[in-house]
């Protein structure tokens, strides 16, 4: 049976994929601590004769598979394709009534990363079994810490996209807002960037009965907060996406003392690099100018988070085309607006063209509809062979794609 014939009978691998997914589901680990998870991934790769590099970014793994199809002297060897699977879990207690629930108290695969690992392993196993039918290279990034410190950025900095250089990169995420057999795509902007905002306001402390002898940092902070409310409504084009949330304020020492210091902490979300930098520059200017006008001073510290996830439109078209062939055009959905949530697959897309898409995993009839990051989250495991087929078909097309 050829790989194409095998892909048309992916339901035959349902039991194997379900077992792999439940094994990972029962042993979840938090970001940067995926030791058992990594060992199990390497066990599968060793069993199937697939080489890998470990460790990458501490607990990450890069599996590497070379196609063995003969290439004529006048023909080009196939491209190099990268596939991403995040491997960390979340700090949640799972319902113990589930037969395959987490065995690690307080930790749960509540974001579907167990499914992502399973799909990646199923894809690379299938490609290995038929390595004589294709030419090129496939690299699988088993990425740690997606939920915490951004393992994708660390893997990229460790060189996972080089040697050989990745030509195209693919990622997927299970999505309980869609039924099994549905695919969600989006051209261009899909997820926001994130920046941690720290605003430090410096005044001069004094006795509350003699405020003229000091500079009130709380009054300055109130003006700064009010001014920043117009950042999105009056400084950013309504055609762009941005949100600024100041979620924490800390300052002052007593009710009868004019505060000398206030710290504001928040988050900035934008969906393109230009808007991101514009917002940061505007916040800094307003903080500094407002505080100077009161006779104090203000400073902005920005802790960069994830970059905006911006898909390559041509590869999104390929995802849509492939999904239509497998599932039917009526089961492909275009996401209307980008999410202001973050996804660190963005760092891979900064290095190579590619696409990130959503794989339906819900089953309303069976009550499988709980959202991601919920302690009731589950998925209809029939999505697993669909995910393997999608990724494998896309890899085969991208291996021979002209750049």
Image (tube, grey):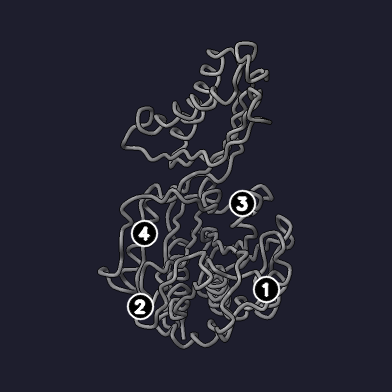
Q: The residue tagged with tag 3: helix, strand or loop?
A: loop
Of marks 2 and 3, the one in the foreground: 2
Residue 12 position in % (x across, y down): 46, 88
Marker disc for residue 218: none
Q: Which residue is labeled 4 in the image?
A: 185
Left or right, 138 with respect to 56, comes to left
Label 2 neighbour load within 10 Å: few <14, some 14-19, many 20+ = some
From the top left corner, tell me how far across and down residue 269 is, in percent.
47, 42
Local SS, label 2 = helix
Q: Position of residue 33 (x, y in %)?
A: 72, 63
Query: Rounded to the nearest whole Å, what is the CA distance between mark 3 and mark 1?
Result: 24 Å
Mark 1 to mark 4 CA distance (whole Å):
35 Å
**Nearer to me, 239 or 75:** 239
Alpha-carbon distance for marks 2 and 4? 21 Å
Using the image, tell me which numbered label, if any, was put on residue 364: 2
91 up-or-down from 43: above or below: above
Q: Could you tell me how far apart the alpha carbons at marks 2 and 3 are, in whole angstroms?
A: 33 Å
Residue highlighted by disc 3: 150
Task: Name the one closer to the observer, 273 or 91.
Answer: 91
What residue is shown at x 63% (from left), y 77% (from top)?
Answer: 102
Q: Position of residue 247 (x, y in %)?
A: 53, 42
21 displayed left or right of 270: right
First reached walking from the N terminus: tag 2 or tag 4 = 4
Say few, some or many: other residues with alpha carbon within 10 Å of mark 3 (under 14 / 14 to 19 / 20 or more): some
């Amino acid at each position: 049976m050829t790989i194409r014939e095998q892909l048309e009978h992916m339901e035959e691998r349902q039991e194997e994929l379900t077992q792999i997914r439940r094994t990972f589901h029962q042993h979840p680990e938090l970001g940067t601590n995926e030791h058992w998870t990594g060992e199990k991934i390497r066990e599968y790769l060793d069993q199937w004769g697939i080489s890998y590099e470990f460790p990458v970014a501490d607990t990450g793994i890069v599996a590497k598979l070379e196609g063995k199809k003969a290439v004529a002297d006048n023909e080009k060897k196939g491209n190099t394709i990268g596939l991403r699977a995040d491997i960390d879990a979340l700090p949640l207690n799972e319902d113990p009534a589930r037969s395959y629930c987490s065995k690690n108290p307080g930790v749960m695969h509540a974001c579907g990363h167990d499914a992502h690992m399973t799909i990646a392993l199923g894809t690379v196993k299938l490609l290995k079994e038929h390595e004589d039918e294709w030419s090129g290279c496939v690299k699988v990034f088993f990425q740690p810490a997606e939920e915490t410190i951004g393992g994708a950025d660390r893997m990229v900095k460790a060189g996972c996209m080089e040697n050989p250089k990745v030509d195209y990169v693919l990622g997927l995420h299970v999505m309980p807002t869609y039924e099994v057999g549905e695919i969600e795509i989006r051209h261009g902007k899909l997820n926001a960037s994130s920046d941690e905002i720290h605003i430090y306001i410096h005044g001069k402390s004094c006795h509350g009965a003699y405020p003229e002898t000091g500079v009130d940092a709380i009054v300055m902070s109130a003006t700064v907060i009010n001014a920043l409310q117009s950042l999105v409504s009056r400084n950013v084009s309504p055609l762009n996406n941005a949100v600024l949330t100041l979620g924490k304020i800390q300052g002052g020492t007593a009710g009868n003392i004019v505060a000398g210091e206030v710290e504001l902490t928040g988050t900035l979300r934008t969906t393109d690099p230009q808007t991101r930098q514009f917002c940061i520059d505007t916040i800094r200017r307003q903080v500094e100018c407002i505080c100077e006008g009161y006779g104090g001073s203000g400073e902005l510290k920005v802790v960069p988070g994830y970059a905006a996830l911006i898909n390559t439109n041509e590869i999104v078209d390929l995802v849509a085309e492939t999904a239509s062939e497998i599932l039917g055009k009526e089961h492909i959905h275009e996401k209307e607006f980008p999410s202001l949530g973050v996804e660190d697959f963005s760092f891979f897309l900064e290095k190579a063209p590619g696409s990130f898409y959503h794989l339906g995993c819900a089953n309303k009839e069976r009550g499988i509809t709980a959202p991601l990051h919920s302690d009731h989250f589950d998925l209809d495991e029939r999505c697993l062979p669909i995910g393997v087929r999608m990724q494998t078909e896309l890899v085969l097309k991208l291996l021979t794609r002209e750049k």
